Image (tube, helix red, strand yellow):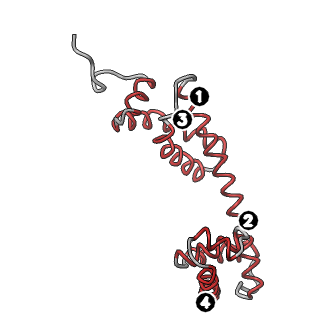
């Protein structure tokens, strides 16, 4: 008797998981396709926003590639997937809170430096500043994030970035000059 292939029958989740763990990309794809709507629905219920739910669902699909190696089948796959989705949703929420704190820190620094727009609402100033920070070269953006967003010293930021403390200071200096120009341009636009 010949064994049936994936194309001839509808495999169970457990069978797809076993194949995916063994490196079968088709099985992994079928597993994701089968459960994507479930992942999205759980994420949407948790987040309450379509864009956030889509981000969480995408993140879960990415995480699933490595996480599937630790799934042992003690619980139903959907139960395990539910936990994975909730964890990704919580991670996204924590990231959003951190981002809001960073934006606030950037906004405070911009106001102190005198580069914020006059007469604009504080939230608008912060968003404008965040848009400007995103336009900085990577090293400058990293230095600003670590020093002003995370509150690290220049020495600690240097260690994280694997560069010298004076180089961090230079990146901060250059970033401030560039941000003043970008914020001025944003105020004119």
Q: Residue most toward the top?
A: 1
- Marks 4/3 in contact by CB < 8 Å: the verdict is no
> Which residue is under mark 2?
101
User: Earlier along the polypeptide chain: callout 3 or callout 2?
Assistant: 3
User: Earlier along the polypeptide chain: callout 1 or callout 4?
Assistant: 1
Q: Secondary structure at mark 1?
A: helix
Rendered image: mark on residue 79: 1
Q: Position of residue 110 (x, y in %)?
A: 72, 82
> Which residue is under mark 3?
38
Q: Position of residue 189 (x, y in %)?
A: 59, 85
Q: Position of residue 101 (x, y in %)?
A: 73, 65
Q: Nearer the viewer, residue 25 or 188?
A: 25
User: Earlier along the polypeptide chain: callout 3 or callout 1?
Assistant: 3
- Marks 1/4 in contact by CB < 8 Å: the verdict is no
Q: Nearer the viewer, residue 30 or 145?
A: 145
User: Earlier along the polypeptide chain: callout 4 or callout 3?
Assistant: 3
Q: Nearer the viewer, mark 3 or mark 1?
A: 1
Q: In this orientation, does residue 79 appear?
A: yes
Residue at 65% x, 72% y: name it. 157
User: Earlier along the polypeptide chain: callout 1 or callout 2?
Assistant: 1
3D distance between C-alphas at marks 4 and 3: 46 Å
> Which residue is under mark 4?
181
Q: Residues within 10 Å of mark 1 (few under 14, many from 20)?
A: few
User: Earlier along the polypeptide chain: callout 2 or callout 4?
Assistant: 2
Q: Nearer the viewer, residue 19 or 119?
A: 19
């Amino acid at each position: 008797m010949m064994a049936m292939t994936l194309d001839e029958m509808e495999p169970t989740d457990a069978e797809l998981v076993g194949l995916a763990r063994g490196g079968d990309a088709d099985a992994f794809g079928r597993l994701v396709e089968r459960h994507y709507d479930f992942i999205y629905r759980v994420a949407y219920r948790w987040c309450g926003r379509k864009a956030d739910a889509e981000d969480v669902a995408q993140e879960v699909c990415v995480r699933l590639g490595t996480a599937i190696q630790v799934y042992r089948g003690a619980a139903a796959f959907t139960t395990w997937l539910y936990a994975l989705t909730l964890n990704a949703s919580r991670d996204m929420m924590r990231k959003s809170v951190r981002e809001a704190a960073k934006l606030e820190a950037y906004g405070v620094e911009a106001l102190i430096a005198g580069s914020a727009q006059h007469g604009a609402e504080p939230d608008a100033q912060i968003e404008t500043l965040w848009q400007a920070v995103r336009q900085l070269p990577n090293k400058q953006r990293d230095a600003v994030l670590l020093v002003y967003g995370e509150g690290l010293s220049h020495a600690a930021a240097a260690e994280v970035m694997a560069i010298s403390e004076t180089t961090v200071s230079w990146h901060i200096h250059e970033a401030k000059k560039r941000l003043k120009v970008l914020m001025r341009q944003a105020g004119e636009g």
